[in-house]
Amino acid sequence: MYPQSRVLIIAGSDSGGGAGIQADIKTVTLLGSYAMTAVTAVTAQNTMGVKKITLIPKKNVQKQITMILDDIGVDAVKIGMLHSVSTIKCVYHILKKYNLKNIVIDPVMVAKGGSRLINNNSIVYLKRLLLPLAKLITPNIPEAEVLSGCSISNKKDMIQVAKKILNMGPKNVLLKGGHLRSKMIFDILATKKEIKVFPKRKIRTKNTHGTGCTLSSALATCLSQKKSIFKSCKISLKYVDRAITYAPGYGKGFGPLNHLVLINSKNINV
């Protein structure tokens, strides 16, 4: 079997392996594509939380990305943790220069254990520079509240906020509803033409570390394989749900997903 496409991951490293580029590489590989990385930060963390963040200088980030683009090529880009304004500006200029497509942004702001991963000034530049370049942005409810300045407590709020974020420039918004306090939750896909609602029953588990990274990488992979935005969302959401359901239960805190769930599944395509 040969890789179907090439996915560039621009994100931080998670020493515990549950999130960050580690989760991204596993996801892209299991879904049948070739993963490449540009590391923006190195974190010392486990399932209990983040203890230290070491930023990679922007020139190093730039060189990692351009070495990939000048040789191997890219069919989609997944952007995760961008801690500083200088890194955001650096990534923006490269995306513009190379006219990259299929850009999926996971606006990482807070780690599962509660550690802040981006400052307010960086959020301003994320909205101003990167959102207009995105094929898709994948905020969870707390991230969507920060981006929009609006509070969310139900499906109706989610739809309104998704539309508001859509007006900031991205072509599509997938607003994740995992933080809703109800048995049934909803993921909302907002496009320029329509609103799609993906309802599901909430999985009661603490093994959710890396769900955002996994979902955004799955989406970038599907888009790189020329799947439609709707089918990409269906496949990716289903993959993440299965990975949560069959999580191995490692660690004392928020455990990682089971990215290998595909190997034991006949078909993830829907």
Image (tube, helix red, strand yellow):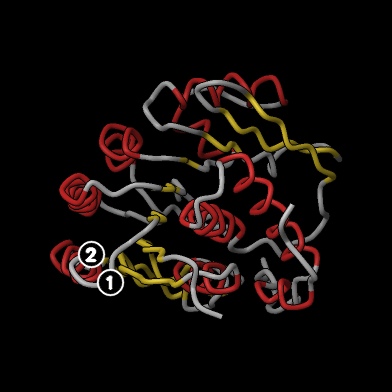
Quick one: which residue is furthest to the front in this view? 1
- The front one of 107 and 252 is 107
Specify the label residue 24 is tagged with. Answer: none
How many angstroms separate mark 2 from mark 1 (CA)? 6 Å
Q: Position of residue 51 (x, y in %)?
A: 45, 71
145 to the left or right of 158: left
Residue at left 46%, top 26%? Answer: 166
Q: Position of residue 218 (x, y in %)?
A: 56, 58
Residue type beneath disc 1:
Ile
| Tally of marks | 2
Residue type beneath disc 2:
Leu
Residue 234 position (above or below residue 57) = above
Q: Position of residue 128 (x, y in %)?
A: 27, 32
Residue carrying label 2:
69
- The front one of 259 and 193 is 193
Q: Position of residue 45 (x, y in %)?
A: 49, 73
Residue 15 position (above or below residue 161) = below
Q: Secondary structure at mark 2?
A: helix
Crowd around label 1: few <14 · some 14–19 · many ≥20 (10 Å): few
Q: Secondary structure at mark 1?
A: loop
Crowd around label 2: few <14 · some 14–19 · many ≥20 (10 Å): some
Residue at left 46%, top 49%? Answer: 106
Residue at left 62%, top 39%? Answer: 230
Residue carrying label 1:
72
Q: Quadrant of the N terminus?
A: bottom right
- The front one of 174 and 30 is 30
240 to the left or right of 26: right
Residue 114 position (above or below residue 177) = below
Contact between labelled residues 1 and 2, with CB atoms less than 8 Å apart: yes
